[in-house]
Image (spheres, grey):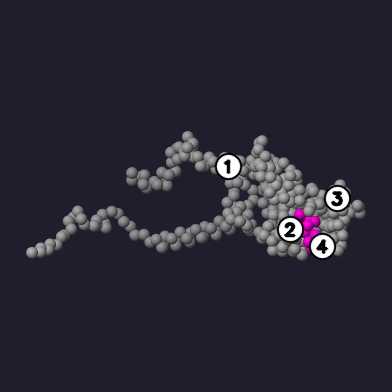
Amino acid sequence: MTMASTLRPTGRDRTPDSHAFPTRPYDLVKEFTLALVAMLVLTIALAAVFSSPDEKPISLVGWAAAAPNDVVATATGELAGTTTSAGYGAPYNDAGPGQTLGPLALQRWAGVTIPVDPAQDLVLAPLRRSADPTTAAALDTWAAAPPEQRTAWSTAYSDALTAAPDGDPAGVAPGDYGPVPVIASSFLALARTGGLEGALDPSGTFYGGDATRGLLLLADGAYLEDQARARSLGGDQWGMMNETGNYPGQPWMWLYTFWYQVPPFATSENADAQVWGLMMLLTLGLVLVPFIPGVRSIPRWVPVHRLIWRDWYRRH
């Protein structure tokens, strides 16, 4: 004989009543929409008040159109070996000691990993790839001359450009400049065509992917710095702009660039190495915060968390 029985849940087995604890209605979609709109309005307002320039990249052809005299002067400086890149040091050449951090010659440690001869790689080689007969003859004259003669020609022409009104090559006084005026004017013509970018690339193709030499050439001139300072972006002007290249970009680097504005870094020849060393030290300190006596106790001394979680602390 089979007996069946119906089991009834006891009070102990029943599901707790939904009103056994306090509840309140919450519309997640509404809260999300309000937060999104508020952040959008705040972002637009702050961008309007605290906006930063978002300039188009400066190209070599744009440089030649806006400041042709500077292009000629820069090409002459590359031939004379008086530009910044010519005396920069590693990783481009051995012409300078580079950045040091105390007794540590940091810039020399890696050596010359991107060899660049400013006169040859930034001026002569690009012209050689697309030289007309007049330019080719000037390049042959330059190549056949001894180093001392090349330096004398380029230095004399550089000085003459400096003395000319507005640095205009047309206003240069007569002198013994050898083939330098022809080389410099041909260089300007190549830059104006838009072919200089491709000619500067190590691959030698028009659509190159290595902009190192082009950036070095542009930085050797005065035009790039003039444009930066006009927008308060000089190293001592505290300026900042939107990044046009690789992420994350300049706005995220404010803590790094901040140190360049204050002594002793603002006037130091080794500011790059010193700021790097300071940032490494600060990063290490941040990592070791839980282990540094005193620093790890700051949350107890400055109980900001109690203000944020004041409702919980009021109840408990």
Residue type at numbered disc 1: Met
Q: Which residue corresponds to mark 2?
A: 200
Q: Which residues are magenta?
A: 121-132
Indicate the quadrant where residue 107 lies: top right
State the SS at label 3: helix
**Residue, x 62% and y 43% (percent of image)?**
276
Lower sequence index among marks 3 and 1? 3
What is the CA distance from the residue labelled 3 to the residue labelled 4? Answer: 19 Å
Give residue 198's position: percent from left, percent from top.
72, 61
What is the CA distance from the residue labelled 3 to the residue labelled 1? Answer: 45 Å
Dot 1 and dot 2 residues touching (CB under 8 Å): no
State the mark number for residue 150.
Answer: 3
| Dot in front, 4 or 1 | 4
Residue type at numbered disc 3: Arg
Residue type at numbered disc 2: Leu
Q: Which residue corresponds to mark 1?
A: 280
What is the CA distance from the residue labelled 4 to the residue labelled 2? Answer: 14 Å
Lower sequence index among marks 3 and 4? 4
Q: Is residue 113 left or right of residue 167?
A: left
Residue 122 painted magenta: yes
What is the CA distance from the residue labelled 4 to the residue labelled 1? Answer: 49 Å
